[in-house]
Image (spheres, rainbow, N blue to C red):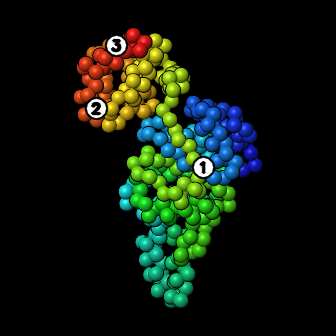
Amino acid sequence: MADSKGGARLPQDIEQARELLAGGNYIAGRGLATVVYLALHMNRPLLLEGEAGVGKTEIANVLARTLGRDLIRLQCYEGLDLASAAYEWNYPRQMIAIRLAEAEGSIAEIGRRLYSPEHLVARPLLRALEPHPDGPPVLLIDEIDRADEPFEAFLLELLSDFQLSIPELGTIKADMPPIVLITSNRTREVHDALRRRCLYHWVEYPDFASEARIVTLKAPGVAPELRKQLIAFVHRLRNEDLFKRPGVAETIDWANALQALDVVSLDVGVVNDTLGLLLKYQDDLARIRGSEAARLLAQIEAGA
């Protein structure tokens, strides 16, 4: 059902928000559904923190799909600057404009013509403020903790007033605020000034039942008994002292790999051969392969 703004209608209560996420095959608890509902209706950015691989980015993808909105993603990294994140001037076109002005004898007009919208190259943040036919887009600012701290200060105007100040043009403000989701893996702390402008939710690893539902959706061909074993193994891995614990994406990859290998039941050999789908660092692999894998499997078999 479409609303007057284009795209799908926003959820009218928390349960509808939960159903909206479920419509995109995202299993959400009531806490997450609540904060998503509030972010949509209060026009507030949503800051999602949690371990890498718990599904923070997927929330933005699901909202864009289920609401029928454009997804605009800004992937943060060290050294991210204004030109890459918001806008820059098209210098080659400006040089052509200067030559044309000289040829036409209209140098007096060159200043106005150089810094006009036609010479502006919009990057993700500015594109999120522009009108979109299906309604305000979903703006994903992914892994903000990877960007330098000064970049956070630049975001404050956008997150407070949904506008950007361009010295040569003035202030560009969104007619309708975009849906803003910001993710952080907490490799560093996000500044309090940014946190105050956002609603907040910590995204946990799913519990056993929720992860079983996720695997059922994403790897439906896996037999129930194998699904139970592999999820139990992943949950035990997350309790180990690892450099990088496996996320939900790794669970799904492993489930699909075991299905492709026609595995019926886990054993030490299967785990050793496929452990690289769960653990992505050699030290973690060396720690778990062999006797540790056998110990975890024995615990699962014993129901410990």
Q: Residue 46, how many percent across, how many down?
A: 58, 48
Number of numbered callouts drawn: 3
Is 55 placed above or below 196 here? above
Q: In this view, does 203 lie above or below 251?
A: below
Numbered mark located on residue 298 in the image: 3
Say if 171 sits above or below 208 in the image: below
Q: Nearer the viewer, residue 133 or 201?
A: 201
Query: Could you classify mark 3 by the number of other residues whose Cα lies within 10 Å: few (under 14), some (14-19), or many (20 or more)?
Result: some
Residue identified by numbered label 2: 284
Q: Position of residue 84 (x, y in %)?
A: 44, 61
Residue 299 vertical position relative to residue 124 in the rendered view, above or below: above
Q: Where residue 54 appears, x then y in whole percent?
A: 47, 36
Kindly identify which residue carries mark 1. 199
* Residue drawn where x is 65% and y is 39% of the image: 34
Q: Which amino acid does label 2 sit on?
A: Asp
**Residue 43 in the image, given as x and y percentages of width and height:** 66, 52
Label 1–label 3 contact, CB within 8 A: no
User: Farthest right residue?
Assistant: 4
Quadrant hosting residue 279: top left
Amino acid type, mark 1: Leu
Closest to the observer, 135 or 176: 176
Q: Is residue 264 visible?
A: no
What is the distance, in whole Å, between disc 1 and disc 3 at their CAs? Answer: 43 Å
Q: What element carries label 1?
A: strand
Label 1 with label 2: CB-CB less than 8 Å: no
Q: Is residue 94 left or right of residue 297?
A: right
Residue appearing at x 51%, y 26% in the figure: 207
Q: Is mark 3 on a helix, strand or loop?
A: helix
